[in-house]
Image: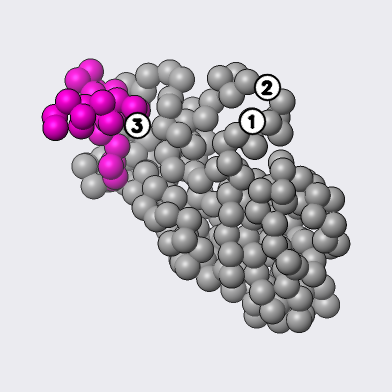
Amino acid sequence: MGELLSQQAPVEADVVIGVPDSGLPAAIGYAMGSGIPYQEGLIKNRYIQRTFIQPDQTQRELGVRMKLSPLEDVLRGKRVVVVEDSIVRGTTTKRIVQMIRDAGAKEVHLRISSPPYQWPCFYGIDTAARKDLIASQLDVEGIRAYNGADSLAYITMENLVEAVGHPKDNFCRACFDGEYPIDIPREIKDAKLVFESGDPGPESEGNMPLDENGLIETPQQTEAREVVAV
């Protein structure tokens, strides 16, 4: 993934770092594909859990500060490529960019080894309601501006599929394209939204329309309905 991402979204830089631990393999691949040296620029505190699943913004921001420590000797005065596996709410990434700048980096270029995460998971991953997923609310430039990076690029779905070496239909891609492989009954959807946001009402659903059976509409269903309405 990292090698293909380096070909898809090259940038002039001095060092490639990964966000531990999930961003490290793609960071190594990006360094190999680009020829830019790889170094460990962030050290992880092993006693802090994933920050994107924390229930409120204050806890998530505190968690980032406690979880990661930048290495100034690696980052100071450098143009840094930061490789991460995904951006969910955007909280963690925003803090990481600022942390790297505070450590003296001259430029910060974000490279994400997954497509934009736009749809919630109903199969066991603790992600938020769609309205809280930053890629469902902003385009790539908007996310870059929010995070404060000098540039931002996500791997394309085509390159992601090429990297794993199997047909895309072999995998669930719902968080990227909204195509849920199994229909999600309304009661399950509502139960998750109550758990994740504490609000089962329409606001917590973001812009996730339902079909006539109370199931989440796919983007294709929504487009077809809008075409018919016109």
**Front position in the image: 9 or 53:** 9
Q: CA distance from mark 2 to mark 3?
A: 24 Å
Given residues 107 and 184, the one toward you in this image is: 107
Residue 20, image x and y in percent? Answer: 72, 54
Residue named by callout 2: 166
Residue 219 is tagged as: 3
Q: Residue furthest left?
A: 229
First along the sequence among labels 3 and 1: 1
Query: x, y (%) of residue 115?
Result: 55, 43
Q: How many residues crowd mark 1 within 10 Å: few (<14), some (14–19), many (20+)? A: some
Whether residue 43 appears in this view of the structure is no
In the image, is 72 to the left or to the right of 112? right
Asked if residue 32 lies left or right of residue 70, the reply is: right
The answer to whether residue 138 is seen in the rendering is yes
State the CA–CA distance, disc 2 to disc 1. 7 Å
- In the figure, residue 185 lies in which quadrant? top left
Q: Give the mark nearest the N terminus, 2 or 3.
A: 2
Expressed as whole percent of the image width and height from the top left, the position of residue 205 reads 28, 41
Numbered range of the magenta stretch = 204-230
- State the residue at coordinates (64%, 30%): 161
Residue bearing the label numbered 1? 161
- The kind of residue on which mark 3 rests is Pro
